[in-house]
Every structure is written in structure tokens, then in C-alpha cells.
Image (cartoon, helix red, strand yellow):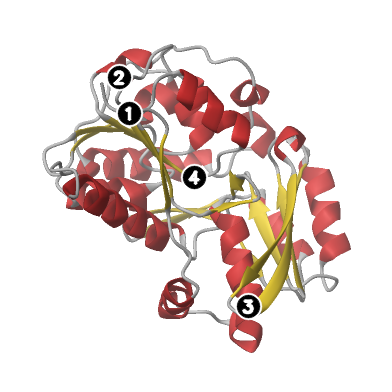
Amino acid sequence: MKRVVSVSIGSSKRNHRVRHRFLDTDVDIERIGTDGDLDRAEALCRTYDGEVDAIGIGGIEFYLQVADRRYYFRDAKRLARAIRTTPVGDGNGIKTIVAQRAVAALDKHLRAQGRTLAGMRAFHVVAVDRYGMAKALVDAGCDTFFGDLPFSLGVPKALGSLRQTRILARALLPVVTQLPFRWLYSQNQYGEIDGKWSHYYDRATLISGDFLQVRSSMPPRMDGKIILTNTTTEEDVETLRRAGVHLLVTTTPRLGGRSFGTNVMEATLLALMGNQARHPRPEDFRRLIEAIPLSPCITELNALG
């Protein structure tokens, strides 16, 4: 039996624990949210270091990767320093890999229905947060636009290319990543749906990105839409079903009724790797993901009208 604990800066309301068998190994997976309390997250990291097989860090990442550049969060270094012996993952090791697999699986699903991603209008909420997913959609031929300015800065202008998101990242992320994390954390992301930027959703067939960001501006009706995202609970799925969403695609599989974040899945893979977990390579992750297989989940919530 392997044990994996994800320490998340996110809401404790989304805590979950499940046991699942991967290949020939049972893994106990637990997610613990600290409601934005970085001190408590650091304390939990120290508590579980050396006591579990791998630790995931959620709600904050060690860095954001935009194309070939990495922008490191100052406060995330506290959590990294608190973990001295246990392998740790923040999701960056597999985020792009699982996003590419999810986009490929979605395109295959659509082609079986006589449809395709090529030419489909897509809205990706924040590209600098999930650049690998944004690029996978562009590479698949989607006509994609990006909500980095409205969602991150409150500026009501969408970006029309990945090049523009890279320019934005180079201008802002060196400063933003050095700010105290409490300035970036917002309890509102777990509150009511405000629908402030819902008009962007109306212009697209496919909506993608971090689920809490996607959820924050959902319009009341999303009939026929496709949502490509990460962590979703059973309650989230019902919210999307009631809104009329056609397909929900998560980059990771559903375990015990919910899909976990990529930090949890990366930590799980590290636990399964054993000695390889100290210096894992992208090909190590990819090989294990395919062997399990750690597949994306495509769920039809409502039939097309």
C-alpha cells in the first residue's frame, strides 16, 4: 500500500480521500485544503514529510511554465523547503502531458460523431496558468482566444494568439510571482458564480482551463458546450449538467466520484516510481501514464439538441 497526501492552499470544502489500485499497487490518496492558509500548508508539509510515499502541492505551483520560460512563485519555495525527504509534485511534471492526451481523446471522440476540433471556436480562460492545454488546443486546429486579461487583470479584452499570452507573461509574471500569495488568493473563487465574463463563453463551443476559473463566470445556460478542465467534484458535474453542458472532459480520470488535480496524479506516479521518483524525466511520467493507463475522462452530460 502506498500513501499519497496532497496539501492544497485551496478550499477545505473540496477535501476528498479515496483508495485506488494502479497496476498491481493499492494507493491511498488524500487531499487536504487549508483555505488559503500558507502557514498551515507549510506545517502539513513538514508533518507528512518522511511519513508518506509522495506529497502533492495544490492551489499553488512552484512555477508557471509559459513556452520555454519558467516563472517561480516566491511563497511556493516555503513549501518546497518544508519537504526534505519525500518526493513531491505540484502538477508541472505531467500537466502538459495529460492535457495533450485529453485533447487527442476529445478529438477522437468528436470524429466518431462526424465532428472535429479543427476550426472549433474555443475559449481558454487563462493561458499563462495552463499554457500546455492552450497550446494543445491550438495545435489541434481550434480557433482559440484567451481570457488572461479579463480573468487576471479585469481588463475587458480577450487575446487572440499564444504569442500575445507569452508577451503578457514576460511583462507581468516576473512581478506577480514575487507578490505575497495572500494577495493572489481569493476566497471568492469558491463563492457564487458572478458571470462577469460570460459573454466570452457565448462566443465559443469549447471552454477550457482551471475549473474554478471556468466556473467563476459561467452563464446560466451552456447548452451544447464542451468543457475541458481539471479537478471536478460530483457537485461540479451536476452544476454543469443543470447548465446544459454537452461534454465534460477532465485531463485526469474520476476516482471515487471526482477527478483530482494534476498535483495529486503526479504525486501518485512518483509514489509508484520508487527510486526513480528522485529525478523523474518527462518520458518516465509518459511511460507510466500509458502503462496504467491514466486516461482522460469524457462524460456526456446532455445530448446535443
Q: Nearer the viewer, mark 4 or mark 2?
A: 4
Mark 3 Cα-neighbour bin, 10 Å: few <14, some 14–19, many ≥20: many
Q: Are marks 4 and 3 in contact (CB under 8 Å)?
A: no
Q: How far apart are marks 4 and 2 (CA)?
A: 20 Å
In this rendered view, identify the residue nearer to me: 295 or 134.
Answer: 295
Which sits earlier in the primary sequence, circle 4 or circle 1? 4
Q: What residue type is labelled 2?
A: Tyr
Quadrant where the image shows the N terminus: bottom right
Above-or-below relation of 96 to 227: below
Locate residue 55 relative to residue 223 in the image: left or right. Answer: right
Q: Are marks 4 and 2 in contact (CB under 8 Å)?
A: no
Which sits earlier in the primary sequence, circle 4 or circle 2? 2
Q: How far apart are marks 3 and 1 (CA)?
A: 38 Å
Locate residue 241 relative to residue 273 in the image: left or right. Answer: left
Which sits earlier in the primary sequence, circle 3 or circle 1? 3
Residue identifier under label 3 = 272
Q: What element carries label 3?
A: helix
